[in-house]
Image (cartoon, rainbow, N blue to C red):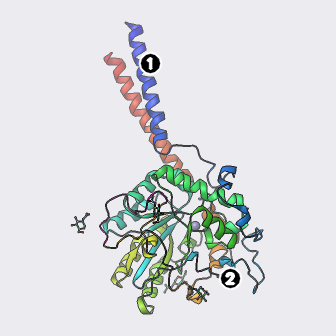
Amino acid sequence: MNSIINNTILFKFLFIYLLIQISKCANLPGSWPPLDKPPPTSSAYTALVDLKKVPNAAVRSSSDSCPNTGSDPYCTWSCTNCIRNQTDYITCPNSGDWGLTFDDGPSPYTPALLDFLDAHNIKATFFVVGSRVVENPDILQRAYKSGHQIGVHTWSHPSLTTQSTEQVIAELQWTADVIKAAIGVTPKYMRPPFGDYDDRIRSICDQLGYKIVIWDRDTNDWLSDGDKSFNLNWVEGNFTQWVKEGGKAGHISLEHDLYSGAAAQGPKVVPILTTAGYNIKPVGTCLGTDSFYKESNTTLPVSSNSSSTPTNTLNTLPTNTNAPINQLNNPKTQSTPPSTPSSSLSQSTSLPAGKKSLAIKSSNFDHFLWSIIIGAILFNSAFIL
Ligand SMILES: *[C@@H]1O[C@H](CO)[C@@H](O)[C@H](O)[C@H]1NC(C)=O
Ligand SMILES: *[C@@H]1O[C@H](CO)[C@@H](O)[C@H](O)[C@H]1NC(C)=O
Ligand SMILES: *[C@@H]1O[C@H](CO)[C@@H](O)[C@H](O)[C@H]1NC(C)=O
Ligand SMILES: *[C@@H]1O[C@H](CO)[C@@H](O)[C@H](O)[C@H]1NC(C)=O
Ligand SMILES: [Zn+2]
């Protein structure tokens, strides 16, 4: 009798232990590189790119070291605002369209933003960091299922022109793979961290099948995390000003959903745009395609109610890409603000220790909670038996 009880309890314990292990993996299968560090290169990834076709632009020693003014043969946007209008998307081409984009998530602050967007049936584009996807796959799944566009924003958020070609490929492909593991599809769109890219990065992205999306309206909202003098009301102020600028020109704006203050501005700017008569669209849609992912030519995992007819290919280039360079906020300020160059990089290359441990703790806490519940059940069944 005793041994039967013990065996039963042992069996139950093993079974439940197994369930816990499975539930841990069920969220995001696979094993992933260390977070927020340049991921390992691999010959399988590198083989996806014909290295002979990649322009021989020098790997920059730092994001500060720009080519001499006046000679930028490799068209480095982060240095000279140089644009190749065959490959670079900086704005929604049609007047009245607004591409609302959020970078650096998914984070614990993304769900509140999604609550708002989903309640108002607004679809945005999220360029996500692979390391954050490992931490918050469920949040990415929610964004995808609600019909938002998911794009690649690298694994560890480096300035890409400072990385070797093999390393750039690894940054993109690890991120694409972790997104695929989380939501089952591979993005066709990417955004280079800090808007830092040149012809070498263009060629890599093109060969890997990513369209490069930057922006023509920058909120600089991410500065608010480290800079106490940054007034978050400026974000609304900026949008209010932008919608007044003539002609209802199409735009792509840059915001972030990694930190609470910046993420909380997302819901506030939406009414500014809609009241002004703008149609907020995922970038892929405003560029004339609903083909956001490599696996399929349809946009949405849920049945779409949009009146726009999806077109299969992105064969229409934006008409006004040769545009308002002077209206572009200098991307260099974004990558290296004058006062705190190193902290500007760390704003996005890594979460502040407190925030990172919060995300990790909460998932450990889940497992801890499960252990207590299961412990209680086992304890109970020991008495019943
Ligand atoms: C727009 O944001 C910038 C900071 O990025 C700020 O200096 C400026 O005052 C803002 N404009 C308005 C109208 O709020
Ligand atoms: C998507 O559309 C392109 C262009 O029309 C076509 O070549 C490709 O086979 C399509 N892919 C799928 C998965 O349907
Ligand atoms: C489309 O939207 C309308 C109103 O917003 C709703 O009544 C209708 O059921 C929706 N159709 C689908 C297919 O989602
Ligand atoms: C591409 O951009 C250049 C300069 O930015 C401009 O002169 C040219 O007209 C543009 N081409 C097209 C097809 O828009
Ligand atoms: Zn970023």
- Give the x, y percent position of residue 79: 69, 79
Quadrant the C terminus occupies: top left
Q: Please provide the residue range marked out in magenta.
A: 294-306
- Give the x, y percent position of residue 47: 67, 54
Residue under the point 34% across and 84% down = 277
From the image, tell me which residue sits under label 2. 80
- Element at badge 2? helix
| Cβ atoms at labels 2 and 1 below 8 Å apart | no
Q: Tell me if I can see residue 3 in this picture.
A: yes
Residue under the point 66% across and 63% down = 158
Quarter of the rendered image showing ligand 4: bottom right
The amino acid type, in three-letter code, at marker 2 is: Thr
User: In this view, which residue lies farthest toward the bottom?
Assistant: 246
Q: Tell me if I can see residue 343 in this picture.
A: no
- Give the x, y percent position of residue 378: 38, 24
Q: Which mark is residue 83?
A: none
